[in-house]
Image (cartoon, rainbow, N blue to C red):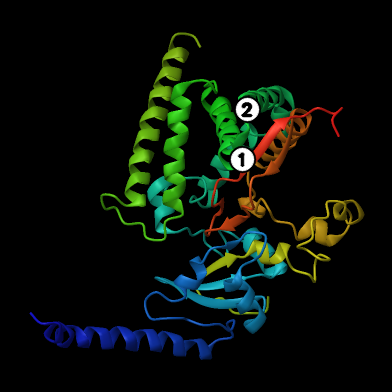
Amino acid sequence: MSLVALLLCFSPLILVLIHTWRSSNSSYNTQNIPKGSSGWPFIGELIPFLKPHPSIHIGPFIEQRISKYGKIFRSQLPGRRVIFSGDAELNRIVFQNTGQKFKNDWPRNFEGLFGKYSIALLEGEAHRIKRSLFVSFLSIERIRGSSLREVDLQASFILDSWKEKSLVYFKEETRKFAFNMAVKLVMNCGANNPEVDQLRREYINIYKGLASSLPINFPGTTYRKALQSRSNVLKYINQKVQERQQQINDGCEGFDIPNGYTVIPALAAVHMDPSLFDDPQCFNPWRWQKESSSPARTNNIMSFGGGLRLCPGMELAKVELSVFIHRLVLAYAWETEEPDPPMALPMVDFARGLPMKIRPYNPSVV
């Protein structure tokens, strides 16, 4: 069949789809919803939305639309009508009303890789119960007690492995540190266990699958590899659970947001908002000392989410970062091999793995 014949056969369907797309856009004028653009038919504004950008900026997609439409604007992604919010007050409302006015929603690849019973996907009482288990397990009292020594040991283990090296990739090393710590806490597996290295590689594949914009389960695709890695991880975890059970047995603002829209809190737009923070792109850690009691300090920083979706591992992340940096500055001097700024792809990543030239620190050498 010729191309012309195919076009003639499918032209009625194409016309119906385009008419539906235009009709849905015309309905925007009947409600007090944010201004914005729907982009192209079917794909919406997916291409500019996924365009990589330095993660220290909010990126041209959000920046240009905030400049044109304001801090709250609408957009369209494949299969989703979306409202982006760079407004601190609306983002706070979203976090505090999840499960009430707003329902939790994630891309399809997230549910496929983590399952519908993942804590991030649960709602209501089921989420509350599972989150309480995480919060109890990762409580500040537990971290400051038994976990603090383990964090220090894991940091020392990573840094000791650098002694014979002159170049390390910080992205890989810090990822290894955090992963080793998680496996030790959850499954009590040591960092020098070869199974842990294999498990970490499986999780890296899953991470790549989360960043995949097309979750297609087809041989050779990133998403297919991620699903295979998920299966391998589940087998390993089930094995460890059975071993543990055996041990126990042996004795051991102002807008209408229509139903059906997806609201994406653009937290970076809040954190980089000059109306909330002076010169937000300037590295100035002392700003927090003078702003410690200001509303911007307490209400507008949402690095770990908020409300019922506040990250239960927040305190552990802070301790890991503090201990690792403490050990690092005492043991090594370093410099970047070449510029490798973090990029949002859309997840934050380093294109070259952040290569660093390192040398043992000698305080007597200036």
Q: Amino acid at mark 2?
A: Trp
Q: Residue 183's mark?
A: none
Left or right of 26, for residue 272: right
Q: Residue 162's mark?
A: 2
Residue under the image location 70 percent in, 30 percent down? 143
Classify 162 as above or below 172: above
Q: Position of residue 276 (x, y in %)?
A: 80, 67
Q: Label 2: few (<14), some or many (≥20) within 10 Å? A: some
Q: How many marks?
A: 2
Q: CA distance from mark 2 to mark 1?
A: 11 Å
Which residue in the rendered view is the most extreme toward the top?
250
State the image quarter where residue 327 is shown.
top right
Q: Position of residue 236 (x, y in %)?
A: 39, 28
Question: Looking at the image, can residue 115 be seen?
Answer: no
State the image quarter where residue 331 is shown.
top right
Residue under the image location 47 percent in, 14 percent down? 248
Q: Secondary structure at mark 2?
A: loop
Q: Amino acid at mark 1?
A: Phe
Q: Secondary structure at mark 1?
A: helix
State the image quarter where residue 128 is shown.
top right
Question: Looking at the image, can residue 93 be seen?
Answer: yes
Which badge, 2 or 1, comes first in the chain's sequence?
A: 2
Image quadrant holding the N terminus, namely bottom left
Q: Which residue occupies the foreground of this view, 344 or 320?
A: 344
Q: Label 1: few (<14), some or many (≥20) within 10 Å? A: some
Left or right of 80, for residue 324: right
Image quadrant holding the C terminus, namely top right
Residue under the image location 37 percent in, 39 percent down? 229
User: Label 1 belongs to which residue?
Assistant: 170
Classify 58 as above or below 217: below
Q: Which residue occupies the foreground of this view, 357 or 196?
A: 357
Which residue in the rendered view is the most extreme toward the right?
290
